[in-house]
Amino acid sequence: MSTDTDTDPDLADEEAREKLVDLAAQFYDQFADGTVPSMNIPTRTKSNIVFDEDEQVWVYGERHSTRSANSVRGAKKLLKAVYTIEFLAEQLEQDRSSTLRELYYLSESWDVEHAQFETQDQSNQLIEDLEIVSEVTREDFHMRPEESGATVMGPLFLREQTRRGEREIHCQEDVGEGGYQIPNNPDTIEFLEHDADFVLCVETGGMRDRLVENGFDEAYNVVVVHLKGQPARATRRLTKRLRDELDLPVVVFTDGDPWSYRIYGSVAYGSIKSAHLSEHLATPEAEFVGIRPEDIVEYELPTDPLAESDVNALESELEDPRFQDDFWTDQIELQLDIDKKAEQQALASRGLDFVTETYLPERLEEMGII
Amino acid sequence: MTSLQSQLGGGSDAGATAEELAEGQRSISIAEFFEKNKQMLGFDSDAKALVTAVKEAVDNALDATEEAGFLPDIYVEIEDRGDYYRLVVEDNGPGITKDEVPKVFGKLLYGSRFHAREQARGQQGIGISAAVLYAQLTSGKPARITSKTENGDGARYFELTIDTDSNEPEIDVHESASWERPHGTRIELEMEANMRARRQLHDYIQYTAVVNPHARIEFHEPGDSEKFERATEDLPPETEQIRPHPHGVELGTLLKMLEATDSYSISGFLQGEFTRVGAKTAQGVCDKLRDRHFGREMAWRPPERHEDAEIEPAVRGAVANKRAEATAAFARRVTQEVREDDRVAHSTVAEVVAEAADGVEAEYDQTFGSTVREKATEAAWSEVAADRTSDCYAVVDGATTTRKDDAVVDGLARRLAETFAGQDDRRNRLTREELRGFVDRAADATEEYDDATFGDTARENVTAAFWDRARTVPDDVPKVSTVADQRDAAAELLEAMRETDILSPPTDCLAPIDEELVEAGLRKEYDADFYAAATRDAEVHGGDPFVVEAGVAYGGDLEEDGEVEVLRFANRVPLVYQRGACATVDVLREINWRNYGLDQPGGTGMPNGPAVLMVHVASTNVPFTSESKDAVANIPGIVDEIELALREAARELKSYLNKRRSLEKRRRKQNVIAEILPVMAEKLTEVTGHGPLDVEDSLARIMNNVLLERSVNGSTVELTVHNFDDTMVAGEVTEIVTADPGGVDDATVVEMDDEWFLKWDAEVQPGESATLSYSVEGDPDFDVSVEGIEPEKLTINA
């Protein structure tokens, strides 16, 4: 993967293009041999995810599925793949980019009906397939997701290689209250300087705004990363780089419910859909701040009862190897026991400053971060 | 069922109708009778009358030609004459003489032998004469008949009327005529009619053509005409007439048979008039008749020597005025003989006495007259029957459950013994009904006095046990003349016949169309893609054997929309009315046709789609729902066979449709993939910048096809057959070359008009290839083709 930010972007593009053409050449040779064109990709399901002990991240297991021209479905998929390869190769050549949705609509202009995508899921999935088989990330294909990336606020000075030239930005001084917006490909960023002690990833926008309003980033030299729910790849990639390149501890602050624990899991260990990129995206050193079920009890936070789906999710997390440690076992069992969950903003019940003046400092000290 | 038929000339009772008409209905005129019964006869409306008349005349014509061994050539013409319709039906049968004319066309009054069993079209035998009568009654015109026999001196023309006063057919005109047919019969009827039932008429004619593939039929109607050619030159096999089966006759028929027979004894009558009855079976029936007619005699265990009752002294005492030693010998013999058996009935004693008397008479020269014998019999019998109680106890005890209290068993046995002792008939002779009466009475008393219960089952068991113990009497069975005069005796005989196990009737009296010809018939009249037929083995219902056949045609030009077409036949006659009442349709509706690949909304009822379903029931006596013989009755055994036949034919349809669907799927797949691969190859060429690609190999592999490729290398030509399928393939490869290849190994070479045909028989195992090679000079043209492999599975890249 072209993670090396020092390389000439044109060279990276050329490499990505070559890899795509190689893939096409592979199909070409299969035809020439009179065999059936096919490509082999890991099965992207929960049951085919294994934990990589060395990297401490989740990666795909041994199981593969074959996309082959053997069946009408397979042939259609491969045809779409070939057309997409051509499109991506041209896009790289012309140094342009497009969104996943644009690819879906663009396929309508292709001359052969079987090559056109029927749903956007199809095109999204194909891009994932191509990423895996060609070992080039979609960012390097110049494909971006629809939604804008999340934001960063904190004592961090960086340089972004934009389409309109280089920009040097300080993530506190050069940005508004909204913070610095993470680009789709964070590998275009070069960290210049920083004055940060740690990175705090926050699940909800409300809490992120509270921290900024209360000046938490300034008070504690924190880079506050807004996760916006399940974090986008770019957010996770940036977090990983902050950890790896600047050697900053990373902590994750979410709601106190099973879905939020999964958000922590995807930051720390990687997600199922992008397990092929786990080494690239996951930050196994990331630690969980809260809200812990223990906090619900300790701070007597206002709560909601667990729904049946919450209970099921908690129980499946008890079985989930990602949560097989004493901390998570204790917390999840406690939560099942008290049958309650709480949001981050429930801390406001003790006053608007409670989170920045009491809760976070106490927790972070406990964790040895400050 | 049969009771319906016997209302009027049903199946087996064909002639009975005629006779009943002649006897029972003399008081009313034939016209009146006809008027009353025309619904049953199929003449209830002008429209239906025409269909029925055509049907009767054509059935008659077909029978006449077939019986004489001619391939039927039938001409039917319907002409609108303003006031009336004129119907002409001609056949190429043997022709008939003047004497036969009334019998054939006035058969209403001249029934054939009523008990003949044969698969024939017009079972009721009243058919064509009813048409003649209908025509005469509505138009007042006689039936005009022209006939020419093979060896006769030209054609004869007759006009036939039925005298409605005397109920006799009369020939009014009889003259010579000229007719172009070498032999045959032509009937011309004028009648009130209309063409409103045109569809049924057409169905009838077309279905007749289907089911008689050996017949040629020409049909003319006002404004239209149609010809149905024959599909086979083979006549259906001749059917054997069989005598009726004892299980298949009704009381009325039996009485008539008894009257008509030349036999004197019942045994002779049974053996002579019925099928499957030999001496042994006749004996079985006679014994059962004796049991019913005379009753049985209860048998008792004779006393042992030491018991109170002593036979020997009793017999000695009964003999008077005989020499002492003869008397003693006589008594000794009787005693010994009686003790031989432990079930001794009165008749047994009488036999033993008679035997002993004869022996002693010979030995001692002493006459033992009938009086002595009787007295001795009575004396011995009294001793044998002296202790009925212990016998009764044993029988009752054996026939009742162990739960019965011993006192109760004893009580019942005692009362029964008393009843037997007090019976008017000292011989203890009684019918089964009387026996049951005895048991009932004794059981009632036992219930009352011994506080026990004797249910119906227990009573029946006891009765059966006693009946088993009782002996059939040796009396002579009544003579035929006696039974014929006594309805009750005849009923007893019928019961006896029904209760006797008798071999099923032979089935060679049936002429199924057979699978091959059912298919041929369908093929002839329906342009479909697929045909199948099934003929079941013969089965027996009542006394009548029957065979069911089914046929299916599917696809092709058959109507796609709406219900399938249903063809119903009974004895090769199409049934075109009362479809809803017919057992065949009931069965059709109940089968889940979706299982067999036909569309069936709701999974029940008539299936839809481009199919023809046909059912043929052949029997010596097809059970119809009514006299007009339009619908087969719902008889379980026949219904089962109809279902099995349909399912059998449908299974073939299913496998055909499955195969067709899988080939269709394959074709669709191939079409799509064959569209995609070249586009993909072209795109790959563009993206990679390599040279153009050939996708045929990949395509063949994807389709698991057989791929045939030609490569030419100098003068060597190689045809390679790759089998990508998982089963072995075999086919005939033909290469046509425009130059002389000389001799070729393993191939036959034939030259025609400067083209050389090279033929190989190629067999290729799954996953393997075979190479066929030859040499040819110059730059010839090639053309290769393969036979024996479905085109869907074949890719030729040459």
Image (cartoon, rainbow, N blue to C red):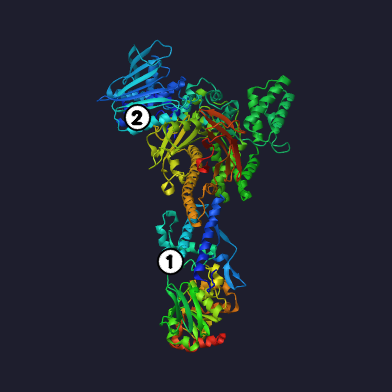
Query: Marks 1/2: CA distance?
Result: 79 Å
Mark 2: which amino acid? Val
- Which of pointers 1 and 2 indicates the residue nearer the eye? 1
State the image quarter where residue B147 is shown.
top left
Q: Pointer 1 indicates a residue of which chain?
A: A
Per the image, the residue denoted by label 2 is B51
| Residue B593 in sight in this render | yes
User: With respect to residue B346, does A215 lie above or below?
Assistant: below
Q: Quadrant of the N terminus of chain B?
A: top left
Identify the secondary structure beneath mark 1.
strand
Asked whether the residues under the numbered discs 1 and 2 touch, taking CB atoms below 8 Å apart as contact, a structural biologist would say: no
Furthest-right residue in this view: B325
For mark 2, does the 10 Å Cα neighbourhood hold few (<14), some (14 to 19), or many (20 or more) residues? many
Seen from the viewer's position, the closer of residues B762 and B89 is: B762
- Of all residues, the one furthest to the top in this rendering is B153
Badge 1 crowding class, 10 Å Cα cut-off, few under 14, some 14 to 19, many 20 or more, is some
Q: Is residue B20 visible?
A: no
Image x and y of residue B752, in percent: 52, 28
Where residue A38 appears, as percent x and y from the top left, is: 54, 55
The residue located at (43%, 59%) in the rendering is A117
Compared across the picture, whether B159 is left or right of B215 comes to: left
Chain bearing tag 2 is B
* Towards the viewer: B761 or B128: B761
The number of callouts visible is: 2
Give x and y (percent) for residue B246. 52, 29
User: Label 1, on which residue?
Assistant: A98
